[in-house]
Amino acid sequence: MAGVSIPTADVLLSRRVQEMVLKGEEPPPLYICRDDDTEDVSSALSSIPVIDLSLLSSSATICEQEEELQKLKSALCSWGCFQAIGHGISTSFLDEIRQVTRDFFQQPMEEKNKIAKGVKDFEGYGADPVPEEGQSLDWSDRLFVNVYPEDTRNSKFWPESPAAFRDVLEEYTVKMKTFTEIVSKAMAKSLSLEENCFLNQFGERGPLQARFNYYSCCERPDLILGLKPHADGSGYTIILQDDVEGLQVHKDGKWFTVPTISHALLVLMGDQMEIMTNGMFKSPVHRVLTNSERERISVAMFYTPEPKKEIGPEEELVNQERPKLFKKVEGYADTHWDYYQRGMRALHVAKV
Ligand SMILES: O=C(O)CCC(=O)C(=O)O
Ligand SMILES: [Fe+2]
């Protein structure tokens, strides 16, 4: 038909979903990806396990510690994720992070575009590059920044407005670094491994990268996803949700909604932890639904081994019943860092 052109992915990715919604535009066809009839969403009572990290500290009894470690192992071997409570980060501080995130996205486009990313880059405000042609697009905008180690930060991508954003993110980074130390040790202990083994694989300079997600309201939640099904290429990811549900984890052929708990952090295994545990911990496929009434925000913190580090299955987890499932994978050049950067699953390159 002469005169009618359907916008391409490149054109759409240079625009913001939030902008289309504010202008009252119809969702373009490239965002349409799901056929609800084929979806199998679980209404089962079983849900993502909740782990109380305070029960893993030396102030808890040995019996409490053992019990919580068993729960942790079972959660990661079956679900590949858990909701962490008792982590020592106050609800009021978590609320502050949620608030600066909302305040950032509520600003005029002009302000946000001061830290816009290039179409093919990762850092900055915008949309992810699409790794494969023909993939549907996500109904979300995001801000992605390196936060640790400090010398990898690009201050030009750290918002100056809202005024509190930088300080809050800096404080959150410090807390996340401590959190990853606690959780990495607990995961090792749950598998009866030396407590520092995963931390040694990540390395002292294992990067933390923050992704602030904004899911605008969507008039067709039956057809459009906030984030399409994917597994994270990270070591593991720590997700702070707001009070709007939307995140779902795939398990046993069904989708399970992650309940919102205001003081909890969802810890979700990525491909690198699946490799390091020789497949014992699962890196679950997950997705985000859209919502016609309320927008949603989340903050995902990706924790990844140092880019140049070689990682592989812990030797103690390789035995006759569980032969080595993965090769060692190096950092650069088509290996773990490369795949993580492209947002693709690393597992298929790492299989023995
Ligand atoms: O928004 C969420 O809850 C999940 C985000 C996520 O899966 C990601 O950023 O990789
Ligand atoms: Fe994810």
Image (cartoon, grey):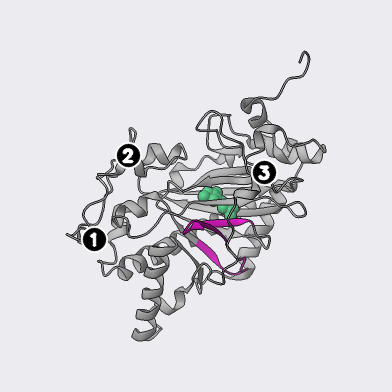
* Image mark for residue 224: 3
Is 24 or 186 nearer to us in this picture? Answer: 24
Kindly tell me whether mark 2's CB lies below 8 Å from ligand 2.
no
The stretch in magenta equals 246-266
Quadrant of the snapshot with the N terminus: top right
Element at badge 1? Answer: helix
Does label 3 or label 2 sit earlier along the sequence? Answer: 3
The local crowd at label 2, few if under 14, some if 14 to 19, many if 20 or more residues have their Cα within 10 Å, is some
Furthest-top residue in view? 2
Q: CA distance from mark 1 to mark 3?
A: 40 Å
- State the SS at label 3: loop
Amino acid type indicated by mark 3: Ile
Tell me the residue that label 1 is attached to: 317
Question: Callout 2, which amino acid?
Answer: Val
Q: Nearer the viewer, residue 135 or 44?
A: 44
**Kind of residue at disc 1:** Leu
Depth order, front residue of 291/338: 291
What is the secondary structure assignment of the residue under circle 2? helix
Ranked by sequence position, the earlier of labels 1 and 3 is 3
Residue 23 lies, with reference to residue 185, above or below; the image says: above
Q: Quadrant of residue 113?
A: top right
Task: Measure the alpha-carbon separation of dots 3 and 2.
Answer: 30 Å
Which callout, 1 or 3, points to the residue nearer the camera?
3
Q: Quadrant of the C terminus?
A: top left
Is residue 320 in the magenta section? no
Q: Position of residue 219 (x, y in %)?
A: 77, 46
- Mark found first going from the N terminus, 1 or 2: 1
The residue lying at 60 percent from left, 66 percent from top is: 43
Which of the numbered marks, if any, corresponds to residue 349?
A: 2
Does residue 190 appear in this view? Answer: yes
For the residue pair 185 and 288, the one nearer the viewer reads as 288
Q: CA distance from mark 1 to mark 2?
A: 20 Å
